[in-house]
Image: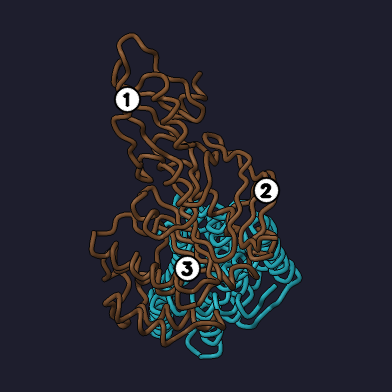
Amino acid sequence: MMDLTVEFKGVSKQYPHFSLDNIDLELPTGSIMGFIGANGAGKSTTIRILMGLVLQDKGTVQVLGHSMPGEQAAAKLDIGFVSEDMRLYGAATLEWHMKFVSSIFPKWDQLYADKLVQRFDLKPQQKIKGLSHGQRVKAALLLALARKPRLLVLDEPTTGLDPVARREVLGELMAVLADEDRTILFSSHNTQDVEQISDQITFIDRGTIIDSDDKEGFLDQWRRLRLVMPQHAEVPRLPGVIDVGGTGRLPVLTTNRFDPGMLTVCQDLGATIQAVDSMTLEEIFVTSVQHRRETLAV
Amino acid sequence: MNYSMVKRLILKDWYLHRIPIAASLLGGIGALGIVCLGGQLAFTAGLVLLLTALIAVGSHLAISTMVNERKDQTLAFVMSLPVSHAEYTLSKLAGTLLIFLFPYTVLVLGSLALFAIPHGIPHGLLPFTTIMAVEVLLNTCLMMSVAMATESQGWTVASIIVGNICINIVGFVVAHLPGIASGLSGASVSWSSTASVSLLVEFAIIALMLGMTFFFQSRKRDFL
């Protein structure tokens, strides 16, 4: 049986203008899940429920074997959490924050914290209010990482960072991935960041999880077929094709269940295969969202 | 309940607000010094300054420890620590009260000590002073409860205004209570049952306000 660090079962949460519907989510121990959704898709609400900060209306949430939100204090001893809207105390220094957090977490690693201070080019004696946005994110990340959490939850940590700071943050996350026992949930609307570090991908849109798979699965199964059709021939109807674009004789078929056999079927119908294009995670995400919204609209 | 964690959160707030606490303490001691100068004008001016120092530190603490935690987005940081909703609520209510009690106790004891110095304050004012001192504490607890329950600067400012009006009304009413009014200008302390009942009512309101705030806040469904 798979060892799960996070397990959502049928979780729903209703707000006046937004609802999270029947979320089932499993995060196996040691995996790095990229949680992708547009702004307002429900990523932060899902993460707040995971952290025990918001009580779900329906369903159960288990994190590190603890039922949330009831056992959140015990669970959070092993969670490092950084969110885009998290701020540290402006009037206090980074050094004070490090002392404060280290007094709470028994697994705090001061040597690692010092290493991160150097790597992120931070000054411990500097007050937080004097730091740039990038430095603040790095400081928050340092405080989360040096506590040596078993689960790292990052809610849009790279939003608003300049390219250099973003690369440094992602670089440190890549280094953290070397620890196979650590599980990471990384939410973002930036698919490039997610693609870089994740091995599992989950798409969320308008409060519903629309797809979840390992990254290779997504990249292997999604393809764009560029065809040239004979005069008056119809575009072949193939299973797994979720979008047909292009123009009359030059259709572009997008599939999320690519199988080389599809090419043979197209050729048998007289089509010429002009190209079979791989898709980026961003293209896959956008197509998934559009397909779902079109399906719901029908 | 993890009291060790609650203690750490209280110490955090103490550290972060040490400068306004020290400033209010210094201001209050200065006000007591003015009272010591003697005379009606010094007494009135000192009393007004003392009340101002206490109300200022109380309202500052209510806003900065409770309202600003959400406004400044530091709540997510605190709630990422191994702390439950109930522990967070307890740390805020107990912590803000304890932090306030430090300058408050020093200044109230200082005020009461003035009665022991021969400079003209009638000892008969002691029961009234004690009741009004507890009224200031009640006023602070009102601001804390509103700040905790609403996390809104607007509502907290409204409670500060209401509280200050109440201090004046309570002062007027207490000064005219038959059991207290008669001894106000007396040379010796005359502690009546009216004074005891007034204090009991004030402490009961404080306990009820804080108890209800803790009860409802620690059961809040959504924290962020």
Does B14 appear above or below A188? Answer: below
- Which quadrant holds the N terminus of chain A? bottom right
- Secondary structure category for the residue under label 3: helix
Q: Which residue is mark 3?
A: B61
Label 1 crowd (10 A; few <14 / some 14-19 / many >=20): some
Judge whether residue A141 can be spotted in this image: yes
Q: Position of residue B38 (x, y in %)?
A: 41, 83
Label 2 sits on residue: A9
B183 vs A284, left or right, is right
Question: Can you tell which of label 1 and label 3 is closer to the viewer?
Answer: 1
Would you say A257 lies left or right of B127 here? left
Residue underneath mark 1? A272
Instruction: Please name the residue shown 69% across and 46% down the image.
Output: A59
Which amino acid type is marked by label 3? Leu
Q: Residue furthest top?
A: A232
Name the subunit of mark 3. B
Q: Callout 1, which amino acid?
A: Thr
Q: Position of residue A129 (x, y in %)?
A: 30, 69
Q: Colour of chain B?
A: cyan
| Chain letter, colour brown | A
Q: Quadrant of residue B6?
A: bottom right
Q: Quadrant of residue B137?
A: bottom right
Residue nearest the observer in this picture, B192 or A244:
A244
Q: CA distance from mark 1 to mark 3?
A: 74 Å
Is the Cβ of the residue at disc 2 closer than 8 Å to that at disc 1?
no
Q: Tell me the crowding category of disc 3: few under 14, some 14 to 19, or many 20 or more residues within 10 angstroms, Cα based.
A: many
SS at mark 1 in the image: strand
